[in-house]
């Protein structure tokens, strides 16, 4: 699995979204209908899965699936086994 697959899976599970509707450029709020609480819960799930802490300033920048994947890669995160 790739980081993209992992992130997409977390989003699909949390938002009950169709995986086909979660492309890289999908905006969590506008395209996928996530509200602020959903966004926080998704970030918390990512933190738990990858054993990292994402600070509030960085959280605000994570608007799309691509943003999340790029952020995780920049932190040296590897795809879950």
Image (cartoon, rainbow, N blue to C red):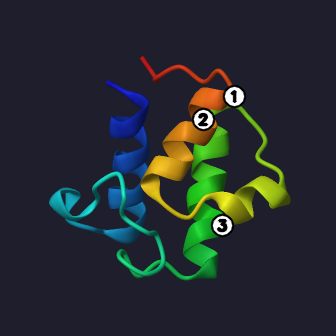
Residue under label 1, please give it: 75
Q: Residue at x 42, y 17 (%)?
A: 81
Looking at this view, is 76 or 19 the one in front?
76
Proximity of marks 2 and 1: CB atoms separated by less than 8 Å: yes
Looking at the image, is 79 positioned above or below residue 63? above
Task: Kindly report the distance in space between the C-alpha atoms of the residues bearing marks 2 and 3.
Answer: 16 Å
Q: Quadrant of residue 56?
A: bottom right
Dots 3 and 1: beta carbons under 8 Å? no
Ranked by sequence position, the earlier of labels 3 and 1 is 3
Residue at disc 2, secondary structure: helix
Q: Earlier in the sequence, mark 2 or mark 3?
A: 3
x and y percent of residue 44 in the render?
A: 66, 54
In three-dimensional space, the C-alpha distance between marks 2 and 1, rounded to whole angstroms, equals 5 Å
Tell me the quarter of the picture where residue 6 sits. Answer: top left
Image-based side of 39 in relation to 29, left or right: right
Residue furthest out toward the left: 20
Q: How many C-alpha atoms fall within 10 Å of the one at disc 3: few (<14), some, or many (≥20)? A: some
Find numbered disc 1 in the image and state the secondary structure of the residue it sits on.
loop
Q: Residues within 10 Å of mark 2 (few under 14, many from 20)?
A: many
Left or right: residue 30 compared with residue 67: left
Point 41% across, 82% down: residue:
33
The N terminus is located in which quarter? top left
Residue 80 in the image: state x and y as whole percent. Answer: 46, 23
Query: Dot 2 corresponds to which residue?
Result: 72
| Residue 77, x across and y down, in percent | 60, 24
- Which residue position is annotated with label 3? 40
């Amino acid at each position: 699995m790739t980081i993209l697959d992992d992130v997409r899976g977390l989003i699909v599970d949390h938002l009950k979204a169709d995986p086909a509707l979660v492309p890289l450029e999908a905006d969590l709020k506008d395209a996928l209908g996530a509200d602020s609480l959903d966004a926080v819960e998704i970030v918390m799930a990512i933190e738990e899965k990858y054993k990292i802490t994402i600070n509030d300033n960085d959280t605000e920048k994570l608007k799309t699936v691509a943003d999340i994947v790029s952020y995780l890669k920049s932190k040296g995160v590897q795809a879950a086994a």
